[in-house]
Image (tube, helix red, strand yellow):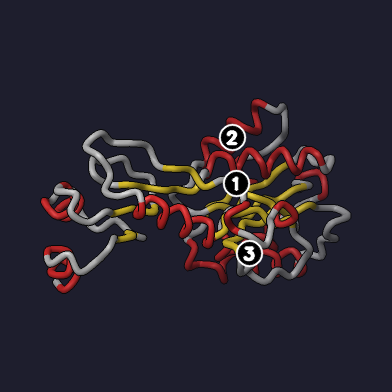
Amino acid sequence: GRLLADLRARRLAGVIWTTFPGEAIVEGPLVRSGLVPSVAIMEITRPHLHSVAIDSHAFMERAIDHLVAQGRRRIALLSVPGHSNDHFRECIHARGLESRPYWLQVLPPQWGASARNLVHLLFSLDPGQRPDALIIADDNLVEEATAGLIAAGVAVPRDLTVVAHCNYPWPTPSAVPTHLLGYDARVMLERCLELLASGPAGATPRPPIPIAPVFDHERTSDPQRQP
């Protein structure tokens, strides 16, 4: 296609892959030759390919520790397929917290509308069966999930603390107060451009550069100064 033609003709200074381009390209001569530097925004470790990736384990650890600092110990998780929910369980166990199998729910991100009814159902349980904290691990689910809390009559933040994933600088609307935790797209782009400016990646594969999650109050106006 046109992209491959531009790469062969060296009309591009670099390429940022936001989705996996396929083995034929990643393992092909255009990337492996190093003629044009490439960076992938994903968990991938390949020769001749830079990569950056969100630190999803740090997200879960920071979310849980923040909730514990708020005095919460009964934590629910609304997640999406592909997330490391095993790490959530490990964090809960390591901290001596409480979670139950039905407090961990997984929905595809495009099923945001279903999150409203699912959360409404979860928080319609008897008070002794309800969590006192909720992590919404994908911003596509935030608006409808928090609407489900309103429908269930949950008093936030009195009875429940919510940590919601965010892709800064544009937080998803929420029906209740939330503690935003996520990744700044501008910081990610800065890291990608720095890698492209450094030239093609070498033949020795390197692990992705992690993008750390930050709470909204930790952010600064200058992406260069982000943690």
Badges 3 and 1: C-beta atoms under 8 Å apart?
no
Which type of secondary structure does the marked residue at label 2 adopt?
helix
Which type of secondary structure does the marked residue at label 1 adopt?
strand
Residue at image position (56%, 58%) is 138
Badges 2 and 1: C-beta atoms under 8 Å apart?
yes
Give the answer, above or below, for where 176 lies relative to 99: below
Q: Position of residue 198 (x, y in %)?
A: 35, 49
- Which amino acid does the dot numbered 3 rest on? Val
According to the picture, the residue beneath numbered tag 2 turns out to be: 89
Image quadrant assignment for residue 18: bottom left
The tally of labels here is 3
- Which amino acid does the dot numbered 1 rest on? Leu
Which type of secondary structure does the marked residue at label 3 adopt?
helix
Q: Nearer the viewer, mark 2 or mark 1?
A: 2
According to the picture, the residue beneath numbered tag 3 turns out to be: 142
Q: Earlier in the sequence, mark 2 or mark 1?
A: 2
Task: Give neighbour class at mark 3: few <14, some 14-19, many 20+ (Cα, 10 Å).
Answer: many
According to the picture, the residue beneath numbered tag 1 turns out to be: 104
Residue at image position (77%, 64%) is 152
Q: Position of residue 166 (x, y in %)?
A: 61, 60
Of the pair 15 and 142, the residue shown nearer to us: 15
For the residues marked 3 and 1, what is the alpha-carbon distance in whole angstroms?
A: 15 Å
